[in-house]
Image: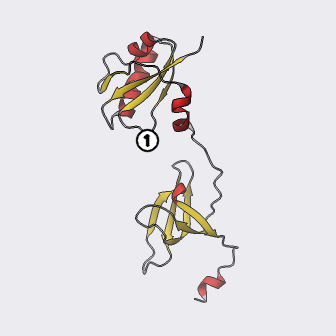
């Protein structure tokens, strides 16, 4: 028998707290709940994969900010696009010249100073800035436009 996926309505922006409470309930009660999913693009909902509807309901019983299950089960195909957490191989190195492709510094060119793969962030310094100020942006918000070969003499001539 295949597990079922249920959508639980929650108070918006409280999804991670609801998940923490549910996880605690599941562990205490020994429920047949197999996965808890919070899709960042969907505020006000978390998904519970459980053996039965009753197990899913028990998992959030007494949990603050949990409002109730939607009447219909959710098909895996419906939430699969939200689950695709594609971990792209990071092809960014320190000293690379990148273009910021989103956010307030969009279209600015910058040099990579540090990469934090755990947080999925990169620290850059804007090239056109009068004073180099380090800015932290998500790795997905930059694209490499030039790789430094290790020769920094060409930059010093400018």
117 to the left or right of 22: right
Which residue is drawn at the image coordinates 62% and 60% (left, top)? Answer: 92
Which residue is drawn at the image coordinates 50% and 13% (left, top)? Answer: 32
Which residue is drawn at the image coordinates 61% and 45% (left, top)? Answer: 87
**Residue 44, quarter of the rendered image:** top left
17 to the left or right of 141: left
Instruction: Give above or below for 142 relative to 30.
Output: below
Circle 1 residue? 41
Q: Secondary structure at mark 1?
A: loop
Near mark 1 (Cα within 10 A), the count class, few <14, some 14-19 or many ≥20, is few
In the image, residue 24 lies at what x, y percent? 41, 21
Q: Quadrant of the N terminus?
A: top right
Residue in front for this viewpoint, 47 or 138: 47
Instruction: Give above or below for 76 relative to 152.
Output: above
In the image, residue 27 lies at what x, y percent? 46, 17
* Number of marks in picture: 1
Residue in front for this viewpoint, 72 or 108: 72
Residue in front for this viewpoint, 47 or 147: 47
């Amino acid at each position: 028998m295949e597990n079922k996926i249920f959508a639980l309505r929650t108070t918006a922006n409280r999804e991670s707290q609801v998940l923490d409470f549910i996880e605690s309930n599941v562990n205490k009660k020994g429920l047949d709940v197999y996965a808890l999913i919070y899709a960042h693009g969907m505020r006000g909902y978390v998904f519970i994969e459980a053996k039965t509807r009753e197990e899913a309901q028990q998992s959030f019983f007494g949990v603050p900010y949990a409002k109730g299950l939607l009447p219909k089960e959710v098909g895996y195909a419906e939430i699969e696009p939200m689950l695709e957490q594609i971990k792209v191989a990071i092809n960014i190195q320190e000293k690379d010249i990148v273009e910021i492709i989103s956010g307030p510094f969009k279209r600015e060119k910058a040099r990579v100073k540090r990469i934090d793969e755990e947080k999925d962030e990169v620290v850059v310094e804007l090239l056109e800035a009068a004073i180099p100020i380090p800015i932290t942006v998500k790795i997905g918000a930059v694209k490499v436009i030039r790789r430094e070969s290790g020769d920094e003499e060409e930059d010093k001539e400018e």
